[in-house]
Image (cartoon, helix red, strand yellow):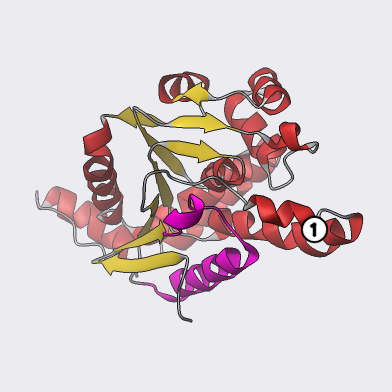
Amino acid sequence: MELKDLIFEKDGHIAYVYINRPEALNSFTLDTLEEFYWIQDQILLDMDIRVVVLAAKGKIFSAGIDVSILESGTPQYAVRYIQKLQEYYNRWEKIPQPIIAAVHSTCIGGSIENILACDIRISNQSATYSLPEINFGFSPDMGATQRLTRAVGAGQAKRLIMTGDFISAEEAFRIGLVDFVVPDDELMEFTKKLAKKIANKPPLAVGVAKKAINLAQDTSLSVGLQFEQLGSSFLFCTEDFKEGPKAFFEKRKPNFQGK
């Protein structure tokens, strides 16, 4: 696929996905989401990719869904398209590789729903965040009422969604919307350092851990513990499990192969 709204690059075991629609404040159209779907397929097929970084080019991170799409806001449109839009965000959670979001400047609406589906969220200090859907006469419909509530609690989720107010990066960190806040000029350096650290870990174990943690938000403790047991039963059969202890006793850095 020829990418027009996104950039997809690889550097070693790390893949970088950049939103690149600066003339429209990096907002999403349905075509943008089709490009995201295609990139997600490539990530799933490429076993060499161990970590994915989601970032953006231009002055802001993203203004979310292009407002022009709202002109199609009918019940028929909702039935036909919203489930597909939701599934795009769901796929970030289903992909076994960890997804790290690096947010700069402004993150609005659907772009917050985008990063909420990622595993780790890093913000620069000058970033601001808002879910303005209420100002257009509707409620977020691509995961914010669910994922934001899980991340920050019901009270904060209601406050942000019902007011549409902007909050600072520091407040986003305080309530749990983002996991790190770093100086503006250190955003990508910090993100790449964290991505490389995770990429050096055994990818199969990282993938099992991601699934187990995600499962903890949606199921009972007993089911989650059973998944942990099954995960270990699988990982104990991998070459990386043999390599880890061997490297420890030989006092050397392990060389994990994802096997």
**Which residue is located at x 39 percent, y 51 percent?**
55
Toward the left, the furthest residue is 251
Q: Choose between 234 and 79: the one closer to the eye.
A: 79
Residue 99 lies left or right of residue 145; in this view the side is left
Vertical comparison of 157 with 12: above or below: above
**Residue 251 at x, y = what percent?**
9, 48
- Residue corresponding to mark 1: 72
Rendered position, 105 above or below 247: above
The kind of residue tagged 1 is Ser
Q: Quadrant of residue 120?
A: top left
Q: Is residue 142 above or below residue 123?
A: below
Residues in magenta, as a range:
20-47
Residue 124 % position (x, y): 34, 33
249 to the left or right of 243? left
- In the image, residue 48 lies in the stretch drawn in magenta: no
Q: Is residue 86 left or right of residue 249?
A: right
Q: Quadrant of the C terminus?
A: bottom left
Say if the magenta span includes residue 31: yes
Horizontal arrangement in the rendering, residue 106 relative to residue 88 (left or right):
left
Question: Whole-percent x and y of residue 46?
Answer: 40, 74
Does dot 1 land on a helix, a strand or a loop?
helix
Residue 1 visible in the snapshot: yes
Q: Quadrant of residue 8?
A: bottom left
Q: Considering depth in this image, is 191 or 5 the residue closer to the camera?
A: 5
Q: What is the chief secondary structure element of the magenta stretch?
A: helix
Q: Is residue 258 visible?
A: no
Taking the spot 66% from the left edge, 33% from the top edge, the residue there is 132
* Residue farthest to the bottom, as pictured: 1
Q: Is residue 95 above or below residue 109?
A: below
Image location (x, y in percent) of residue 145? 71, 36
Residue at the image point whose x is 32% and y is 68% from the top: 9
